Amino acid sequence: MSEVIKNYIVRENEDYIVNMGPQHPSTHGVLRLELVLSGETVKQVVPHIGYIHRGIEKMCEYDTYKQIVHLTDRMDYLSAHINNEAVCLLVENALEIEVPERVKYIRVVLDELTRIASHQLWWSAYGMDLGALTAFFYGMRDREKILDIFEESFGSRLLHSFNTPGGLMHDVHPNFQKHAMEFVKYFRKKLPEYKQLLTDNVIFRNRTQGIGVMSRETAIAYGVTGPSGRGSGFSCDVRKIAPYGVYDQLEFEQILYEQGDSFARYMVRMKEMEQSLNIIEQAVDKITDGPFTAKVKPIIKLPEGEYYQRVETARGELGVYVVSDGKKFPYRVRFRSPNFSNLFVLNTIARGHLIADLVAISGSLDLVIPDIDR
Amino acid sequence: MGLKKKPKIKSMKYEEFKDNETLELLEQLGGDVILTSIDEILNWGRSNSIWPLTFATSCCGIEMMAAGDPRFDFARFGIEVYRATPRQADVIIVAGTINHKMAPVLKRLYDQMAEPKYVIAMGACAVSGGPFYHNTYAVVRGVDHIIPVDVYVPGCPPRPEALLYGVMQLQRKIKVSGLLTNKVKKDKKKKNKKEDNEK
């Protein structure tokens, strides 16, 4: 904790105060950072949030549990499918609904495809932030292959709201398994290309190695989860520490790096894509025939009480907390979003670095702004 | 009531566009042979080099990025150069929800852009508030409450093809509008006013 307290600084008259955002290409959305600079060195970063606050938590109080699923898509839109699953799992656990095996494995495949698509987009955008425009075209090229699989089954590319409490909206396309396996083979061949393009690039390495070092204590103190936390050696993968779905029956590694700099966070995501491919390979074979949903009443009423469910999105731990008073609408819904915690560590790790490195640091945290403001 | 002057857009037949009243009104303005000819050349240049502003608030921004990727390739229509500063941009693609805290910022960005400027409202949120129309206290219900919109692209989020179609509609609008002929119209108005005063 002492490290956290040390971060409060006294502003001096010579300090130069600059606003970065809300309209800035490298903040990936509408985030405003108030920078206190001394020369070109960053003394303090004060994030101002709320530019995309839509009141999703309040809206949930007027929606049934099946309708809430559609709102969670719009929070962290790059891991939309995983956000849906958080609410679905909460309702299923509360009502003790038995979900068919087929659904569980399809969900895992979709989760991991979403995770890869999200990391690909982050890779493209991170390259662009650091001045490597080529990365954008290579990353987006492969991302379209995943979106094709989504489109074939759900008819939508980005926000598909395919999960529903009890199972899936409808059955997947007959070619789903075949195309998922084709993608795994395709992307295995393309990963070395990513390594050649950006990972082994000298300029890229010099700009990320040793920049924005986050210690394990800082990561835990701020609650930094996901690949950003694992880059500092904080074992926080919800798929491992509190398995949901069928993750306990699948073999995969939790990627941990000890360095804690921007490059470590980058490497965690690159290795995670390989692990996701392994998971897809295992899970696709286990998709059996059967129903695509359990029998669930059209209007779900949770018994009185408090419920909590957490899942691992592409950015970290998403928690859903629901207070129910036994009616068809929840009494209160609260989301513990990973990006909120990941953003506020920026002040600690960006201090003392140059203003040009701030983009490299904030990019390596992989922030999605609507998830912060909700 | 069809248009007399049929704007040509590369790789899209004229019949595939749906006519609308705004374009018909623009057509009725008319003007001299010389001025309209110069206009045609100017509009040809302007419509094929629209530079958008990098402005994305939420999910639609990802599809806007996807429209620039190798598969959909914005650059075919001359609009691949995203500008981070409003001073260099021609069109602002409002991709995503605008809430009450963001609204003044968007207005300011629009004011900072140089004339002639255009607005595309991309996605359900920018068109009408979309999924955040009811039961929320924070969202502006449609970006047309703040700035004038030229083209609406519905969808949540719209596909990149939909955005491309929207951009082509904007190109078409630019092609039938006139920089110089509008001035002629203003002159006519002045004359009419003078005549009214004399009467």
Image: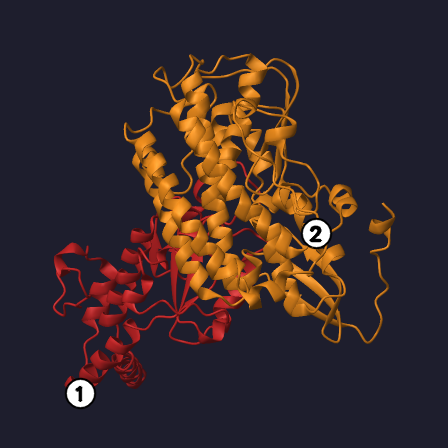
Chain colours: A orange, B red
Q: Position of residue B119 (x, y in %)?
A: 39, 63
Marked residue chain, label 2: A
User: Disc 1 vs disc 2: which is toward the camera?
Assistant: 2
* Residue visible at 61% across and 13% down in the picture: A303
Same chain for the residues under marks 1 and 2 in the image? no
User: Dot 1 lies on which element?
Assistant: helix
Q: What is the tally of numbered marks visible in this picture? A: 2
Judge left or right: residue B48 versus residue A24. Answer: left
* Residue visible at 41% across and 22% down in the picture: A286
* Residue visible at 35% across and 35% down in the picture: A181
Cα separation, mark 1 vs mark 2, equals 69 Å
Q: Indicate the quadrant where residue B120 lies.
A: bottom left
Q: Quadrant of the C terminus of chain A?
A: top right
Amino acid type for the residue under numbered disc 1: Ile
**Residue placed under numbered mark 1 in the picture:** B34
Q: Position of residue A207 (x, y in %)?
A: 62, 65
* Residue visible at 45% across and 52% down in the picture: A192
User: Dot 2 lies on which element?
Assistant: loop
Amino acid type for the residue under numbered disc 2: Gln
> 10 Å neighbourhood of mark 1: few (<14), some, or many (≥20)?
few
